[in-house]
Amino acid sequence: MIADPYLLLKWLHILSATVLFGTGIGTAFQMVWAMRGRDARVVHRVASGVVLADWLFTTPAGIVQPLSGLGLVYLQGYPLTEPWLVATYALYLMAFACWAPVVVLQIRIRDLAADAARQGAPLPRAAWRAYRAWFALGWPAFLGLAAVFWLMVARPPLWG
C-alpha cells in the first residue's frame, strides 16, 4: 500500500520543523550555559558540538522545511501569495538571515576558545564580542520561527 503523499509530506514538514526548532533552542541553551562558565576548554568542546549539530541537523532541516512547505502548498491548492504564506516566507528568510552569520560566529567562538584552551588562557575579548553578536542574532531567529509555527497552525487572513 502506497502512503498518502500529502500525509507523508506533512509528516516530513512537521518532523523537520521540530528538528530545526529543537536543535536551535537546544544548542543555543548549551552555548549560553558553556559561556557562563567562562572555561575556554568547555566553550571549545560545546561550540564544537553546536557547529556539528548545525551541519548534521539544522542545515538539512532548514532545506527540507521550504521544500516540504511548498509541496504542501501545492497539494492543498493554496495560492503562493496567500497572506499568511507571504508572512511565513518573510519570517523564514529573516530567521535564515540571522542564522547564517550565527554559524560563522559559532565557528569563530569555537576556534578562539580552542586557541585560548591550548594556551591555558581565558577566552579573549573577540570571543565575547562574537558571543554577544551570536546571542543578539539568536532572538529574532527564535521569535521568527515561533511566529512561523503560529502561522502554520492558525493560517490567519492577516490582511485583505
Image (cartoon, grey):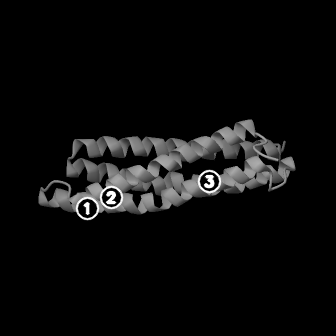
Element at label 1: helix
Could you classify mark 1 by the number of other residues whose Cα lies within 10 Å: few (under 14), some (14-19), or many (20 or more)?
few
For badge 1, the amino acid type reads Ala
Q: Percent from the top left, x then y, of residue 75?
A: 84, 50
Q: Residues within 10 Å of mark 3 (few under 14, many from 20)?
A: many
Give the spatial CA distance, label 2 vs label 3. Answer: 23 Å
Residue 86 image point, x, y percent? 73, 53
Q: Is residue 90 left or right of residue 158?
A: left
Label 3 sits on a secondary structure element that is helix
Residue identified by numbered label 2: 130
Residue of label 3: 92
Check disc 1 and report the residue beneath it. Answer: 126
User: Given contact means CB atoms under 8 Å apart, are the residues at marks 3 and 1 in contact?
Assistant: no
- The type of residue carrying mark 2 is Ala
Q: Quadrant of residue 104?
A: bottom left
Identify the residue shown where x is 66% and y is 42%. 14
Residue 15's place in the image compared with 74, above or below, is above
Q: Amino acid at mark 3?
A: Tyr
- Comparing 49 with 36, the one in front is 36
Residue at figure coordinates x 42%, y 45% from the top left = 27
